Image (cartoon, rainbow, N blue to C red):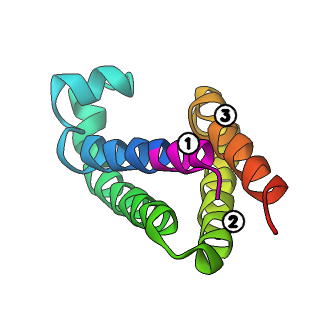
């Protein structure tokens, strides 16, 4: 696969790893509350849900990293699947939670997925 696509997919993996850290460990901190525009009370009330969401992001990061490291024959289906998952999650989040998710999560996944599908052999 093209090196630029590998870098883009790797960057999306790192992005989701950072979401995992933010949601699983930093949710209740001043930084986490600022990122998600929440009060301390809101953060406390939703912390368990955030950890669960963070774990899902960790799995997406792991799958994307796997797709970057996989042999060429396995890379395409892995990248397609995990980027598709990120895209759907970004679309749902953008339509239900915050519009900014469309730009932060869905758009990079859509660009990477389009690139992966364009370079399939």
- Badge 1 crowding class, 10 Å Cα cut-off, few under 14, some 14 to 19, many 20 or more, is some
Report the front residue among 29 and 80.
80
Residue ranking furthest to the bottom: 73
Which residue was labeled with disc 3?
A: 102
Mark sitting earlier along the chain (1/3): 1
Q: Is residue 9 magenta?
A: yes
Where is residue 43? Give x, y as percent: 27, 37
Report the front residue among 12 and 87.
12
Q: Which element type, helix, strand or loop, lies under badge 3? A: helix
Disc number at residue 94?
none
Q: What stretch is highlighted in magenta?
A: 1-10
Location of the C terminus (image quadrant): bottom right
How far apart marks 1 and 2 lie (CA) works out to 13 Å
Q: Which element type, helix, strand or loop, lies under badge 2? A: helix
Where is residue 73? Give x, y as percent: 64, 79
Does residue 51 sit above or below 5 in this rendering? below
Report the front residue among 20 and 99.
20
Mark sitting earlier along the chain (2/3): 2
Does residue 81 sit above or below 115 in this rendering? below
| Residue at horizontal 60 percent and vertical 41 percent from the top | 4
| Residue at horizontal 62 percent and vertical 64 percent from the top | 79
Which residue was labeled with disc 2?
A: 80
Nearer the observer, disc 2 or disc 3?
2
Q: How many marks?
A: 3
* Overall secondary structure of the magenta section: helix
Where is residue 74? Give x, y as percent: 60, 79
| Residue at horizontal 46 percent and vertical 42 percent from the top | 11
Residue 17 located left or right of residue 85: left
Where is residue 48? Give x, y as percent: 27, 57
Which residue was labeled with disc 1?
A: 8
Mark sitting earlier along the chain (1/2): 1
* Tag 1 near tag 2, CB within 8 Å: no
């Amino acid at each position: 696969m093209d090196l630029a696509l590998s870098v883009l997919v790797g960057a999306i993996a790192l992005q989701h790893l950072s979401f995992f850290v933010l949601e699983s460990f930093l949710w209740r901190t001043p930084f986490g509350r600022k990122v998600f525009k929440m009060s301390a009370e809101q953060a406390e009330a939703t912390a368990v849900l955030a950890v669960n969401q963070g774990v899902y992001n960790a799995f997406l990061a792991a799958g994307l990293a796997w797709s970057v490291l996989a042999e060429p024959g396995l890379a395409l289906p892995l990248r397609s699947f995990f980027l598709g998952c990120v895209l759907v999650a970004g679309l749902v989040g953008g339509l239900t939670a915050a519009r900014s998710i469309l730009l932060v999560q869905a758009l990079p996944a859509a660009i990477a997925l389009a690139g992966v599908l364009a370079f399939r052999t």
